[in-house]
Image: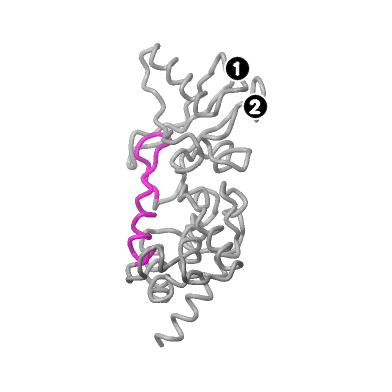
Amino acid sequence: MKISLKVMRQTGASAEPRLVNYDVLGVSEDMSFLEMLDVLNEQLTERGEEPVAFDSDCREGICGMCGIVINGVAHGPERTTTCQLHMRSFKDGDVITLEPWRSSAFPVIKDLVVDRSAFDRIIDAGGYISVNTGAAPDAHATPVPKADADRAFEAAACISCGACVAACPNASAMLFTAAKVTHLGLLPQGQPEREARVVNMLAQHDAEGFGGCTNIGECAAVCPKEIPLDVISTLNADLGRALVHNA
């Protein structure tokens, strides 16, 4: 296949972005999307041009670093991570536009690579359990209702890829934050810090410059791990309890 790419090139956060056209020849439908970008970069290197910078990392859909906005959709036309997207989802002659995650909280490092350390700081603010909950056998002995366990595991599937931010017109990270709040708040071990957790993580979310949630739902629609939108309701309920108790 021949694929025409329009790639947003940018040398750094303060540099002016520019859309550059490339034709990629010899693309197989069995290639992954990132393998197609490897082919492009080989062609650029042979011509003495600067390769396109992108995060690849695991290529197994477990780390989330590969995120690219493809034709206006975070991770592309399939509900999966970019590294698990294959060229069979496209056809010969297609024109594909590639952009990085766009958010002031995710400054561009270079081309399609962004700095997602804002997520790390949200986790540092409260996305953990620091109280002594005993060793593994003790935790094993603590009964957890199956519905709560299932929902906690569902929320814990979040890989912090940032697709929710890229898809949201407000650049909100509420789905990410809510997933982290929910999966700890549903477990017995997460109860001692439950109220402080939601207050501190939301405060850090806002301090990082992420937008507010207006329940549009684009975040859940593109989430490769299918985190449900209603985790945000759980976060709001926890926040309400925390504010009442601290009033």
Residue range in magenta is: 106-129
Secondary structure under tag 1 reads loop
At mark 2, the secondary structure is helix
In the rendered image, residue 111 lying in the magenta stretch gets the answer yes
User: Residue 174: percent from the left, percent from the top?
Assistant: 49, 61
The C terminus - image quarter: bottom left
Figure check: 65 above or below 181: above
State which tag comes first along the sequence, 2 or 1: 1
**Farthest top residue?**
46
Mark 2, other Cα within 10 Å: few <14 / some 14–19 / many ≥20:
few
**Which residue is drawn at the image coordinates 55% and 43% (left, top)?**
74
Disc 2 designates what residue? 88
Q: Residue furthest right?
A: 91
Quadrant containing the N terminus is: top right
Circle on res. 2 = 1
For image coordinates 57% across by 63% down, the residue present is 151
Above or below 10: residue 150: below
Quarter of the image for residue 55 reads top left
Judging depth in this view, the residue of 113 and 31 nearest the camera is 31
* Amino acid type at image mark 2: Arg
Q: Residue at x 50, y 38 (%)?
A: 68
Quadrant in which residue 48 is drawn? top left
Q: Is residue 188 left or right of residue 196?
A: right
Whole-percent x, y for residue 231 in the image = 56, 64
- Image coordinates for residue 207, horizontal then vertical, percent: 36, 63
Q: Are marks 2 and 1 in contact (CB under 8 Å)?
A: no
Q: Name the kind of residue labelled 1 in the image.
A: Lys
Front in this rendered view, residue 212 or 56: 56
Q: How many marks?
A: 2
In the image, 184 versus 244, the foreground residue is 184
State the image coordinates of residue 53 (x, y, percent, origin top left): 39, 30
